[in-house]
Structures are given as structure tokens and as C-alpha cells.
Amino acid sequence: MTIKAGVITFPGSNCDRDIQYILKNFFNISTEILWYDAFFEKNYDLVILPGGFSYGDYLRCGAIARFSRAMQSLYEHTKKARPVLGICNGFQILCEAKLLPGALIKNKNLLHIAKDVPIVKGNCEYFKTLNDVYYIPISHSEGNYIADQETLKELKEEGRIAFYYKENPNGSIENIAAVLSKNKKILGMMPHPERATDPLNQKTDGYIILKSILEGLL
């Protein structure tokens, strides 16, 4: 079966071509770039919101991007229970759009953090075979995940925490690095697995993470 993915490009996106390259060359997934200011009607198997700084991160990260035409099409995509993956800025946009719970605020140290960090699997069944620590790059100023206690309880009880930071770099509540929607078809994560997939980077832990995500969502 041929899998087709769409990657939404916003003004300020800078990881759209990265994830397109990785999906095509390492997972044999046909991928199209979707312009933020245009509706899309094709039935994609997966839509990805890439990393970057949509609209320059003005107002709040993702707060303006959520109103784009492409996002209106994404809402229709999610109504059909079709998978969505948001990476870094994509995670921020999904939270602003209320497609994922919680919010992402400024890092606890108020600095931009760009480094490889260790992550481990969360409590979602998608990742039960992942038993190691994986080093994945992060690059964000607003990656501090917050949620109220009721939401946190739901995420735990419903197995919707995808990944934890082993060493919390940004102050995220209970070290949470990635979460899933109620139907577990929408995943948002701050780390960038696409930046640690190609051996040319001398980093390949991201391949394992992306493979498990794609197998779980699709």
C-alpha cells in the first residue's frame, strides 16, 4: 500500500523539507508540501505540521498559524480520524488549535535550547517495544509543556503520554515531551526525530522513534 503524506508549510517553517526528505528516503512515503494559505482536499494518510517559527512566533507560538486555510482543512482531516504528527512548532500549533491538550510556554530558564536530549517511551502502547534511551535534538524557546491536573490525570490513565524527557531540559510538567489526542491519532512532540535519522548526521536514534510513531499512527 502506498502511503501519502502532506506537510503544511507556514511562513517561518524551516523543517518542512527536512521531514519530506526523511519520509521519502527512509520510509518510502510519498510526501507533498501543502501551502498554509490554501485549502487541501486530498485524502492524505498523514498530515505533518513541521518545526520552525510560524509567523515569527508573534503573539504566541502557533497562535496565528491555527487560523490558516490549511488548518481548516486539517480539522476536516481529523474528523475522519486520519493521523496527524506535529513536531516542535507543529506541536505548539496543535495545542493552540485545541487538537491536543495543554499548552507550551517559555522554557523555565527563559533561553532558547538547542541540543540533543535523552528521551524514553511514555505510557502509550504504540511504543511498548522501545526499551532504550534515545538521543534526539531539540531546538525551542517555548517547549515547556503545561497542563492542569485533570488533563494530566487523563493523559496518564488513557495511555496518551508518548515520550518523556529523561533529563528535563525546559521545565515541562512531569518531564513530558510528547502527547497524543484522545483517539491517539494526533501526536505532538517537541524533539526533532527527523534531525537524527540520516547517518550522514552521525545520529540515527530518530529513525527508531519515527518508525515507531508511523507504525502506531498508521
Image: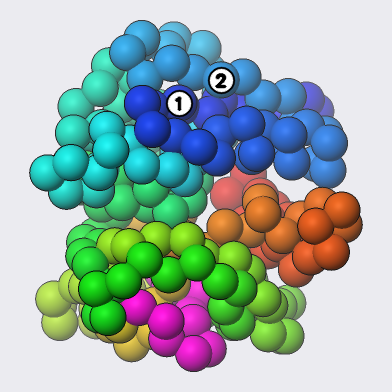
Q: Amino acid at mark 1?
A: Thr
Q: Quadrant of residue 100?
A: bottom left
Please give the range of residues in magenta: 159-170
Residue nearer the viewer, 74 or 105: 105
The residue carrying mark 2 is 33
Q: Secondary structure at mark 1?
A: strand
Q: Residue at x 80, y 57 (%)?
A: 201
Task: Specify whether 145 is left or right of 119.
Answer: left
Q: Is residue 165 magenta?
A: yes
Amino acid identity at mark 2: Ile
Residue 176, quarter of the rendered image:
bottom left
Q: Circle 1 sits on which residue?
A: 9
User: What colour scheme has been applied to the protein in the rendered image?
Assistant: rainbow
C-alpha distance separating marks 1 and 2: 7 Å
76 sits to left or right of 122: left
Q: Is residue 139 above or below residue 136?
A: above
Label 2 SS: strand
